Amino acid sequence: MNYDLIVIGGGSGGLTATQVARRLGARVLLIERKALGGECLFTGCVPSKTLIRTAAVAHAMRSAARYGLPASTPAVDGVAVMARIRQVIARIGETDSIAAFEKLGSEVRIGAPRFVSANELELDGKRVSARGIIVATGSHPAVPAIEGLADAGFLTNESFFALKTLPRSMVVIGGGAIGLELSQALQRLGAKITIVDHEDRLLHKEEPDCSTEIRARLEAEGIVIHSATKIARITREGDRKVVHGTQAGSPVTIAADELLVATGRAPNLDGLELRAAGIDADAHRILVDDELRTTNPRVFAVGDVAGNYYFTHTAAYEGAVAVRNALLPLASKIDYRAIPWTTFTDPEVARVGLTEAEARAKDDDEVTVVKARMDSVDRAITDGEEAGFVKLVAIRGRLVGAHIVAAHAGELIHPAVLAIREKMKIGTLAGMSWVYPTLSEGVRKAAQSTYETFLARRPVRAAVGLLMRLKGR
C-alpha cells in the first residue's frame, strides 16, 4: 500500500479526517479537485454568515430608534459588500491551505481521482492505494426540472457568491435554510425578495411553531412569501425573470431581476467510478452503514456525499469516526441523537433531537413538552430581542428534543445538545445555576416549568404540605 489512508475531498469531513489520521501517525494522501476548504468556505457557511452580519448592521441602523438612538438608512454599496465577503473567505481559508496540511505531514494533491479497484485509485495517470479510503466529496445544489429555468438563467448559492454586486430584486425558490438566510439578508440590504416554496410551510422539517414564528418576522420585514405554490414554468421578459405558477388553484406570476434556486443538495459523484470499487450509491447519497462503511469494506463516506445531514459540523464528526473505523480495531458507530443545527435568520432557528410529533410517535403517554417565550427573559428585554421561544421535549423525564427560536439560538442550543448526548433528565437543566442576565435563561425557564407543572399536581402539593408541617414541629 502507498498510504495508510487516502482522503478524497478537502471540505470539512475530509480535512478533519486528514487531521485525525495524522495525529494517529498514519501516512495520508489528501486529494481535492479544486482548493481546500470545501463548500462551507467558498459558497456556504462563511460567505453567507458574512453577508448576514452585514445585513444585520444595516437593519440595526434603520431600527436604531427602538434603542433611543437616531435611525438612519445606510447607503448600501453592493460591490463593497461582496468584496468584504471575499476578504473574509481569504482570511479564514488560510487555516485550510495546502501548506498548512503539508506542514501537518500530509501529502496533498490537486486532481480528479477515480476508483480502479477495491483499494486503488488512478490520479493523473498513476495508481495509488491505501488500507482505507474515505470519500468526502461533498454535494452541489440540486436543480429542479422546471420548464424554462435553464433558458431564463438562475443562481444557486455557489454562483450567487461569485457576483460582484447585489441584485435589486430576486425570487427565491425554496423555503429551507439557504433560501431564508439569503432572502432576509438581501431584503435588509435593499433588495425586493419573494420566496416561492412548494411546501405548506417554511422550514417544513422544523416544529410548526418555529415555522410560524420565522414567517411572521420575514413578512414583517417586507418579504413576500408564496407557500404551497407549484411552479409551472419560467420565462424572460427583457432582463427580468418571470415565475409562473399556481397557489390553491389560482395563478401566481412574479418577476424579478434574479432567480435563486435553493431546493436541496445532490452528491458529488461524477468521475469517481464507484462501481469499479464495488460501492453502491443512489441519486441522493453513497450508501453507508452505522459505521460509515460503504458496500466496499475498505471505503468509507462522510459528509454531504453520505447524505445523512448536510452540516459542516456533522461532516467533521463523521470524518473523525470514519478514521477510527478505517485504521483501528473496535469500530465506533455513528450517533446522530445529539446533532444540532441552526438556520441563521433573525431570529435564529436552532434544533437538536426529536420534534414533539416524533417523540409522541415513540411514547405518547410519557412525553412532556415545556415552553418559555423569550419576552419573559430579562436579557432579551434589555437587548430588544424578545421574539421567539424555547421548547423542550422529554420522554419519561429525559430530554430528547430542543427547539429554539431566538437571537443567538445557535449558541443557546448547546446545553440541550449536552443533555441529550448524556441522557440527562430535564430537571438537571432546571437545577443548574445560570448566569443572570443572559439569553440562556430562556432554556432554564423552559426546563424549570416542569417543576411548576409537577408541583401543581394535587397529590404532590399534599405531600409537600405534609413535609413542611413535619419540618415545623
Image (spheres, grey):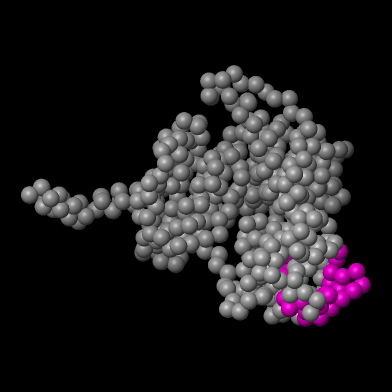
Query: Can you say whether 22 is above or below 411 in the image?
Result: below
Query: Can you say whether 330 is above or below 55 in the image?
Result: below
- The residue that appears at 66% across and 39% down in the rendered structure is 52
Q: From this viewpoint, which residue is outermost toward the top?
A: 70
Name the dominant secondary structure of the magenta segment. Answer: strand
Q: From this viewpoint, which residue is outermost toward the left?
A: 473
Front one among 343 and 36: 36
Percent of width and height locating residue 393: 43, 56
Q: In the displayed structure, does residue 274 sit left or right of residue 354?
A: right
**Which quadrant of the structure image shows residue 118?**
bottom right
Percent of width and height locating residue 206: 55, 53
Q: In the displayed structure, does residue 435 sit left or right of residue 23?
A: left
Q: In the displayed structure, does residue 104 sit left or right of residue 471?
A: right
Percent of width and height locating residue 112: 85, 66
186 in the magenta segment: no
134 in the magenta segment: yes
**Which quadrant of the structure image shows residue 278?**
bottom right
Percent of width and height locating residue 40: 71, 52
Q: From this viewpoint, which residue is outermost toward the right?
A: 125
Q: In the displayed structure, does residue 163 sit left or right of residue 330?
A: right
Front one among 200 and 28: 28
* Camera sees residue 139: no
- The residue that appears at 47% across and 54% down in the rendered structure is 416
- The residue that appears at 66% across and 69% down in the rendered structure is 24
Query: Can you say whether 125 is above or below 387 in the image?
Result: below
Query: Can you say whether 281 is above or below 448 in the image?
Result: below
Front one among 237 and 421: 421
Residues in magenta?
Answer: 111-136
